[in-house]
Image (cartoon, grey):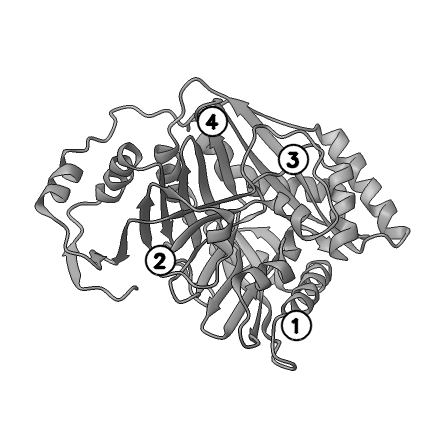
Amino acid sequence: MQSTSFIYPIPDPSWIEKLCRWADVHFDFFAFTNGNGQHYPEEPFATRFFAGNIQLSKTDVWSVSTNFKKVGIIGYDFKNRLEKLKSENKPFFELPEICFFQPSFSLAFDGENICSENELSDDFWKEIDRTNLPISTNTACLVKPKISKEKYLKTVKKIQDHIIEGNTYESNFCQAYSGSFETWDPIAAYFKLNELSPMPLSFLFKAKSQWIVSASPERYLKRAGTKIIAQPIKGTIKRGKSTLEDESNRKTLANSEKEQAENLMITDLMRNDLSKVSKTGSVKVKELFGIYPLPRVFQMISTIVSELKEDVSFSDIIQASFPMGSMTGAPKIRTMEIIEELESFKRGWFSGAFGVIEENGDFDFSVIIRSIIADLEVKKLYFGVGSAITYDANAAQEYEECNLKAQAILEILGGK
């Protein structure tokens, strides 16, 4: 919770959605983050709201000294600025690699209260109160997978051939669903998705005509003073329909040698990445193979922490660790080349990072997964799902894991 001077009760349960709809009219950019009260290592996202009209230049994003917050996106294809890589697959629509804004208005939420650094005027309350929620909303959109199941299975075999040849040990292969629409309501979609799948790092983000509706379960990086935290997820299993089945599934995931091997490879990769910007000997695995219950799945999460070297900047940290290893594989650079060769779409914002950078340099970024990316001007949307392919991966099971990850989003887009 931010340091605040003014605390107000939330007038009614629909107030936050009204706030988002009010902001959509008055601001080019806004973001709402929500941890949903989930039990999550190192805490979920704080529940906060930011809005503004100033898009930041790349210089401002990477600047070390600023006296304002920065909220935004680092797209996956920013990798090409960090390494000699390329993104030649066709995009669904064009997206900026970096998209941050400076909030002129921000709020924090603590249970039943709204917290503000500035006093909120009577006119503000009246404006939100007068904001009507639409009687009917459209979140439905006919989406199609970019590749067939048959092609997916064949591609997994190609990745396993690369593994046999020693080119990669583990590759996070992703497929996409896409669709077009005449009208689509991202605000309604977010609140419906968050009701269906209330995740610890969920967020709604608007950048002019482009939106992200996210139910992300995964943290990329969090900085608190000199401490840096990485939390790669590798290992997924569905929740059970009964207490007995739920516990059985949890144990199955916890004891899976395959999932542990996948998780360990990415944990080691993230340890290596953090060592580039951390004090010697300070990189520690705080928790290995933690099993956490989320609304529809159990996830295997490992937590790596370290102490940053003196004068390490946000730019230094991103350069050392982006993209996150859980969305690439290992070894990172060669595996990203293989991903580019075998995937059927340009990832864009999918599998990038979203977050908030505080005035003091602290930050918290999620991984953009379980997320719908839309452009209301070109009237298109897409989302991606993926899983880690290793030598002993079963292609059909990996395909079903992708279906499990896509389930809540498909329900929203199906208009159910």
Label 3 and label 4: CA atoms lie apart by 24 Å
Q: Quadrant of residue 43?
A: bottom left
The circle drawn on residue 414 is 4
Label 1 and label 4: CA atoms lie apart by 44 Å
Query: Which residue occupies the extreme top position in the image?
Result: 182
Label 2 and label 3: CA atoms lie apart by 32 Å
Residue 37, image x, y percentages: 36, 58
- Mark 3 near mark 4, Cβ–Cβ under 8 Å? no
Label 1 and label 3: CA atoms lie apart by 30 Å
Of circles 1 and 4, the one toward us is 1
Q: Earlier in the sequence, mark 2 or mark 3?
A: 2
Q: Give, as a three-letter code, the residue at label 1.
A: Ser
Is the residue marked by circle 2 packed among few (<14), some (14-19), or many (20+) residues within 10 Å? some
Give the residue at mark 3: 346
Label 1 and label 2: CA atoms lie apart by 29 Å
Q: What residue is shown at x 54% (from left), y 77% (from top)?
A: 310
Q: Earlier in the sequence, mark 4 or mark 2?
A: 2
SS at badge 4: loop
SS at badge 1: helix
Q: Earlier in the sequence, mark 1 or mark 2?
A: 2
